[in-house]
Amino acid sequence: MKIKDILRVTNGELVVGKEELECNEFSKDTRTIKEGDIYIGIKGEKFDGSKFWKQALDNGAEAVIIENIEISKKEMEKYSNKTIIKVENTLKALYEIAKYKRCLYNIPVIAITGSVGKTSTKDIIANVVNMKYKTLKTEGNNNNNIGLPLTILKLKEHEALVVEMGMNHFGEISLLTNIAKPTLAVITNIGTSHIGNLGSRENILKAKLEILEGMKIPKIIINNDNDLLHGWYQENKGKFEIHAFGLENESEIEAKDIKMEEESSDFTAIADLEKIKIHVPVGGTHFVYNALCAMTVGKVLGISYEQIKQGIASFELTQKRMDMKKLDNGALIINDAYNASFESMKVSLEFLSKHTGKRKIAVLGDMFELGEYTEELHRKVGEEVVKNKIDILICAGENSKYIIDEVKKHSNIKTYFMNNNEEIVEKLNQELKKGDVVLVKASNGMKFFEICQKV
């Protein structure tokens, strides 16, 4: 891709520079810009990236794409050996450049969405696909309207692309899928994340299904044990290509004989009447689902079961999600503080309850964006705390009071309500003993990751 291509797709104006310049790397951050990058000055809520164009060029950028900033004659002379492009809207320009880049590649593009488990599923799928194809994947959770196009712009000699798509309102997946143009879609589950914005789980399903809008030929993989996805599958199978995986409902790929350990899982996958032994290097039922999902993707892409097995067995989890740290006093902290919904709380509490530690301690905070369901879903978390026989519950946050209230109704579990993260750190430092296992989980805005850093 050259500057002239960018000018064409964005209808941009070349203020100064070379139309034949090759564009290899793109950046939106002057702090991390590298020599030769193309800087895109995106306008955010708090700052206007276009205002940092000189800083970008001074830091090594070869070209900048900016909105209508005045450039003096002196500045034109100073940067005459660089390239400056003006566009009406840098965010829309980013979309158009990414769309153009995507159309240059005739490769499998796997797009993943779902209420929980997108990032871990993306990691395991990418590892499986990489067994056969040189694969580019979304790094971390860069799954929004800026992260996704920037991921596409990293395509080079790749033979496959695995992208994650996040959303919290209608229309957001629609935008992303029309940029990425997936050849295969994956929906991990439909839960209650962002239910406050969307109003119901049925609406969440509708928003997730926008993923099909960007596909020339609809082809989708779903978790057949999720009630809403199972219902949708029953209504729509035969209309287009749908592949299903599951543990409970009859599916194309199923798991039997599941053996759970703290840090791994083993099961027998049933696919095409074959029995395949699978080892997952992470514990928890949800990772069995992730592995089944990755197997289904691999099967659809024509990857051998032997390669699929290797891809699952060798995958590594993105840090900050269920990140475990052994403390000096012998206690273990499970940092799952990146995000929280009722479904992910349930999974994490089940994981904690199966751990072999002496005492199971849950440090839980508020879940955000639940709207009218806020009290109900926090109380349901309380029920899960009781069901999983947690020994000590420590909470902070206005809505976590409902968790404690529900726990007190049904059990004698020791509970503590704290006013802030500092008080939680203090309490943990007093309370923790050798062999204790502590789960720390809340929505990211609660900043519970600070607790894990300070204990």
Image (tube, rainbow, N blue to C red):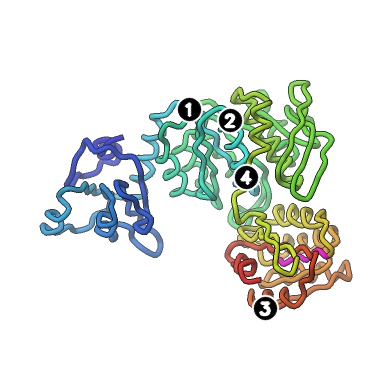
Q: In the rendered image, which residue does mark 3 sit on?
A: 423
Q: Is residue 374 left or right of residue 153?
A: right
The magenta segment: 359-364
Q: Label 4: few (<14), some or many (≥20) within 10 Å?
A: some
- Pointers 1 and 4 in contact (CB under 8 A)? no
Q: In the rendered image, which residue does mark 1 sit on?
A: 107
> From the viewer's perspective, is residue 235 above or below residue 327?
above
Q: Amino acid at mark 2?
A: Met
Q: Amino acid at mark 1?
A: Ile
Viewer-side label of 1, 4: 4
Q: Which of pointers 4 and 3 lies earlier in the amino acid sequence? A: 4
Percent from the top left, x then y, of residue 317? 63, 47
Q: Which of pointers 4 and 2 lies earlier in the amino acid sequence? A: 2
Percent from the top left, x then y, of residue 9? 30, 37
Residue shown at the point (12%, 54%) measured from the top left: 77
- Pointers 2 and 1 in contact (CB under 8 A)? no
Residue 240 visible = no
Q: Does the magenta segment cover residue 360? A: yes
Measure the C-alpha gap from mark 2 to mark 1: 15 Å
Q: Amino acid at mark 3?
A: Glu
Residue shown at the point (83%, 65%) measured from the top left: 359
Secondary structure beneath label 3:
helix
- Pointers 3 and 2 in contact (CB under 8 A)? no
As drawn, the label of residue 316 is 4
Percent from the top left, x then y, of residue 225? 75, 39
| Magenta region, main secondary structure | strand
Percent from the top left, x then y, of residue 127? 59, 37
